[in-house]
Amino acid sequence: MSIKLFELLLQAAIYTVTISVVSILIGFAIAIVISGMLLSRQRLFALPARIFVSFFRGVPLLVQLLLIYNLLPAIGINVPSIVAAIIGLSLCTAAYQAENLRGGFSSVPTGLVESGEMVGMTPVQIFRRIKAPIALRLTFPALVNEAILILKASSLVSVVGVVELTRMAQDLAGSTFLPLEIFASAGLIYLVINWIVALAGGLIERSLPGVPR
């Protein structure tokens, strides 16, 4: 396989990473809200959050992407394929991240929260200094794993017309008749990207405040 073909795969890989990172960050922001709703004692908040999580965890991502891609124009919202893809990935990962965060917040020792209340800390201070650091430390490995899953799942966005790494590999394999070399190279690029994410996640995890390991 020529250097030119490999460069095309690398360019598509950058597109894949960009889509994935944006989706993961947006999904994390949504997940924080959803996890808070899941932990709420008010049914008005908890029930919609449970429905959201159940839907996006229960329906295949491929179906979600096709549904969003066709639904938006149907309701008068015309967006580029890349936007529809990011919306689909963001909502999907938000459901999984929300469950991870919910588990993390539920695992925060009540004694620490009560101690914070006894010394006069406000609910915001308790959340920022006690709940959030511990919950993030407890759930960080799961969040890194979810990031890796989304990076791999981003290969599905080709169904809505986005040319990312997998789609580029398919196009090149069809035009060059070198499927083995092309897909082996694409697989190697995915492996390197996910290895870097896992390595960076491990380094960040060791620097997080919270409960000692």
Image (cartoon, rainbow, N blue to C red):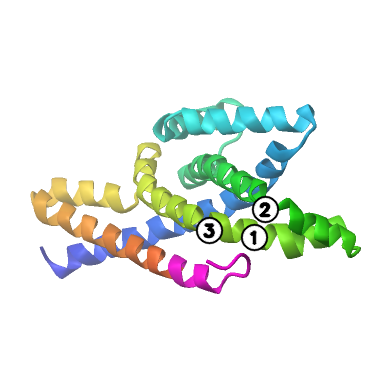
Mark 1 is surrounded, within 10 Å at the Cα level, by few (under 14), some (14 to 19) or many (20 or more) other residues, namely many
Residue 132 quadrant: bottom right
Above or below residue 206? Residue 25 is above
Return the residue at label 2: 108
Q: Residue at x 33, y 64 (%)?
A: 195
Q: Within the image, what quadrant is residue 114 found in?
A: bottom right
Q: Which residue is mark 3?
A: 140
Q: Any mark on residue 134, and which?
A: 1
Residue 158 in the figure: left or right of residue 2: right
Q: Is residue 136 something that shows in the picture?
A: yes
The picture places residue 52, in percent across and down from the top left corner, at 61, 31
Residue 45 location, x and y as percent?
75, 33
Q: Which residue is pictured at 28% across the width and 49% down the height?
A: 166
Q: Amino acid at mark 2?
A: Val
Which region of the structure is painted magenta? 201-213
Residue 76 visible (yes or no): no
Given residues 73 and 187, the one toward you in this image is: 187
User: For the residues marked 2 and 3, what is the alpha-carbon distance in whole angstroms?
Assistant: 14 Å
Query: Magenta segment: does it hold 204?
Result: yes
